[in-house]
Each structure stands twice: as structure tokens, then as C-alpha cells.
Amino acid sequence: MRNHDRGELAKDILLAVAACGAIVGMVFVFSALPGLAHIFRLFGANNNRERMRIRQSICGLERHGYLQVYKKGGEEYIKITPLGTQMMVRRSIILMRPVKPKKWDRLWRLVMFDIPENKRKSRNALRFALQKMGLSQIQKSVFAYPYPCKKEIDFVAGYFKIRRGITYATANNIEGSAILKKKFKV
């Protein structure tokens, strides 16, 4: 079993249950008692210490409402909850990266937004997501990127329900682009 940072094991378990659940209709069945044999094999838990870490992570996910563990007909089931699904979407937004083409088309993509104060949390989440996607902040509400990223921006904006406050533009030149070219190595 690879070393996981604090909280990363739980996220990986949630991802594994979500992935397996998508294959088997959002419910995954473990047949052997204590019901975690498949998860143990999946994560390569070979000793009691590693198995205990996995059990603790699953209990924590259940305690926070991301997973539901229950028995039915003598078999143990683990089901991802709607809250767990929502967490997975958030995590996928954070891990999302626009595809980098082989050759730069010499155009800059600008993402500008004006989100009202009553949606401050969504605005801050958008800013965080743009930074995690690799966009460079030029001003408080203006980000630049050298490659196409409209699909990713639309997905994030749709998730946070703030699409109307975002403008996506393409520009030939940006003042101070030498710094951006150096940062993006283009």
C-alpha cells in the first residue's frame, strides 16, 4: 500500500467506491467478512496496520455522510451518498486541467468575472478553481491562460451557477505578456 498523506486515503477510497459504483449501479458489494476484502486488495493492504487505516478512513467517510455502509442479506454494501458524489465533483474540479496542445497558437485566453457580493463563496471557489487549473491571475477578477480552456471554464461556472458573471475572451497581446510567456514557457 502506498503512503497516503492525511485525508488522501479517504479521498482515494471514495473515488474507488464511486468508480466501482458507476460500474455496478452506484452500489458495490463486498462478499467476505468484515466486508472490506475487496477494498483491502484494491489498496494492497497486506497487514493489520494498513487494514486498520482503511477501516478508519471508511468510518470517517461514513461519519461525515460521504458513504453509507449497511448489511443486506448477510452481505455488506458500501454506497456513495449524494454528499459523497458532490465531494467527488468538487475534487474533479480541483484536479481538472485544460489540455495543452503541442504548439501554442499565440493567443491568450482571458477569463474575467464580475460576481455579486451575495455569491461571495461561489466567487472565491471560482478563483480557487482557476488557480488550480493553472491559469495566471492578472488582477483580482482577471485570469490569463495560453491554451483553450472554454469547456473547463463553462463546467466550473455551471457547477457554481455563476455563468452569467463570467466573460471568456481571446487576445493577441496582453500588456506584460513577457512575464506570462516565461511562466507558461511559451
Image (cartoon, helix red, strand yellow):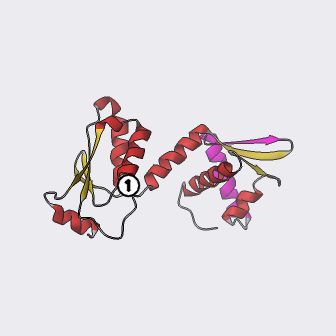
| Callout 1 secondary element | helix
**Furthest residue to the right?**
74
Residue at 66 percent of width and 63 percent of height: 43
Task: Please tell me how crowded label 1 is: few (under 14), some (14-19), or many (20+) other residues with Cα within 10 Å.
Answer: some
Question: In which quarter of the view is residue 4 placed?
Answer: bottom right
For the N terminus, which image quadrant?
Answer: bottom right
- Residue 143 vertical position relative to residue 106 in the rendered view, above or below: above
Look at the image and say whether residue 92 sits in the magenta stretch: no
Pick the residue in front: 82 or 2.
82
Q: Residue at 70% across / 65% down in the picture?
A: 45
Looking at this view, name the residue that lies furthest to the top. Answer: 118
Residue receiving disc 1: 132
Residue 53 percent coordinates (x, y):
66, 57
Q: Is residue 182 left or right of residue 95?
A: left
**Which x, y percent locates residue 153?**
37, 48
Magenta-tinted stretch:
48-72
Q: Nearer the viewer, residue 80 or 49?
A: 80
Tell me: residue 90, above or below residue 109: above
Q: Amino acid at mark 1?
A: Lys
Most common SS among magenta residues = helix
Q: Where does residue 50 sit, x and y in percent of width and height?
A: 68, 63
In the rendered picture of this protein, how many numbered marks are placed on residues?
Answer: 1
Quick check: 63 left or right of 90? right
Q: Residue visible at 73% across and 66% down?
A: 47
For the C terminus, the image quarter is bottom left
- Foreground residue among 149 and 121: 149
The quadrant in which residue 41 appears is bottom right
Picture layout, residue 42 above or below residue 64: below
The answer to whether 59 appears left or right of 103 in the picture is right
